[in-house]
Image: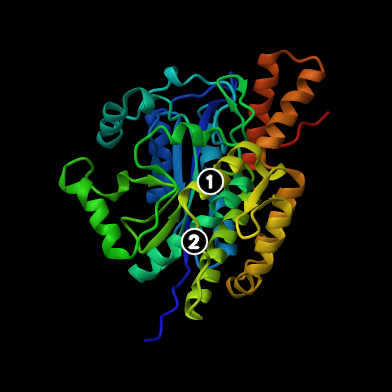
Amino acid sequence: MTLKEPSFSFGIEEEYHLVDRTTRDLAAAPQELMDACLERLGDQVSPEFLKSQIEIGTPVCRSFAKARQQLAHLRGTIGEISGEFGLAPIAAATHPFAHHLQQTPTEKERYQSLAQDLQGVGRRLVICGMHVHAGIEDDELRIDIMNQVRYFLPHLLMLSTSSPFWQRQNTGLKSYRLTIMQALPRTGMPGRFAGWSEYQRTVNVLVKAGVIEDATKIWWDLRPSHRFPTLEMRITDVCTRLDDALSVAALYVCLCRMLYRLRRANQSWRMYPVFLLNENRWRAQRYGVDGSLFDFGLGTLVPFRDLLREIQDLVAEDAEALGCQAEVAHATNIAREGTSADRQVAEYERLRTAGASEDEALKGVVDLLIVETLAGTKAAPRPSVA
């Protein structure tokens, strides 16, 4: 039987923190702000777990030109509306100095229930991620590609890191967000499933016992979407720069298509134990693009920048088919210049060296995040005139 090619349509979801433009601390969104966003953006915007967060989602996209336009529109509209309330969005996985105990869950039944269930672990969820959905309509193929693409999740994480700070401290990690996430139940790298039926049986054990209502309470790094015929990649930090977000999304969708091509040729990517995949996950979380990952076939550590070139070669055909050669090529710039995490740490150190206090330097990092989040949108801050 001929395997029908998936659509490989895609959608991107981003979570943002909202900060006070004066104090640069996190700020709860007034209901009027959310109402204005909902009026302008409809179901493309929603509140998040905390009142100081907001989430956006693109419509289903079949081109990265459309995705770029949509993300710029969504970021810009939220920047414009929040500016009317003296606030600004920042696309960073953690805030440089806000304290988690000062944040308040959104007054929505789902989030109040989560807060009650997760207790102290939930109160630390002052984090924002980026999720990318890849359209893979066949259930069995979705699980097959899920099993294989796990290998590449650390590589995607490395390109997205934006959470080096936590409550005024430089943690020494490029993605501290993952240390917060992995304290929750049902998170981390998913195991391997024999097929769709085994996945459903596994989830239904918890559903039938009343532990979870449905698969939306499974927060793995990668999961079949409960609502859509998509494979949802969830490991990445939210990318501060728009170009970086599109690059990571393009690489993910291309990797899924590359693995489909292997399947069509009766081949597959070699499977490795979760134990080994988690070693690369940790190295990505700790070191970012300056680090190295295991090439398990060779049994040696290889600099990430070398591995990235190999991945770009692997998906060259797919990037051409999906029309995202520029986005895939941009990953080279991220690897060379660093991610948001690298720029945040560099800005903090630059300001401290110039004589700024710790408080002033951390606020300066927030200022950098505001500018980079809104760059290329209608809400981009205008340069000051001397």
In percent of width and height, residue 172 lies at 64, 28
In percent of width and height, residue 116 lies at 27, 27
Residue 152 vs 32, above or below: the answer is: below
Q: Is residue 197 visible?
A: yes
Which residue is painted at 51% across and 65% down in the image? 256
Q: In the rendered structure, which disc, 2 or 1, sits on the residue that comes first in sequence?
A: 1
Q: Is mark 2 on a helix, strand or loop?
A: loop
Q: How many labels does the image show?
A: 2
Q: Is mark 1 on a helix, strand or loop?
A: loop
Residue 15 - label: none
Colour scheme:
rainbow
Residue 43 vs 194, above or below: the answer is: above
Which residue is painted at 47% across and 67% down in the image? 9
Instruction: Identify residue for label 1.
Output: 236
In percent of width and height, residue 162 lies at 60, 37
Place residue 194 in its image quadrant.
Answer: bottom left
Which residue is painted at 42% across and 60% down in the image? 231
* Residue type beneath disc 2: Met
Quadrant where the C terminus sits is top right
Instruction: Identify residue for label 2.
Output: 271
Q: In this view, does 46 lie to the left or right of 110?
A: right
Label 1 environment density (alpha carbons within 10 Å; few <14, some 14–19, many ≥20): many
Label 2 environment density (alpha carbons within 10 Å; few <14, some 14–19, many ≥20): few
Q: Nearer the viewer, residue 135 or 275?
A: 275
Q: Is residue 352 left or right of residue 294?
A: right
Q: Can residue 234 be seen in this view?
A: no
Q: In this view, does 367 lie to the left or right of 53?
A: right
Q: Which of 9 and 302 is in front in this view?
A: 302
Q: How far apart are marks 2 and 1 (CA)?
A: 21 Å
* Residue type beneath disc 1: Thr
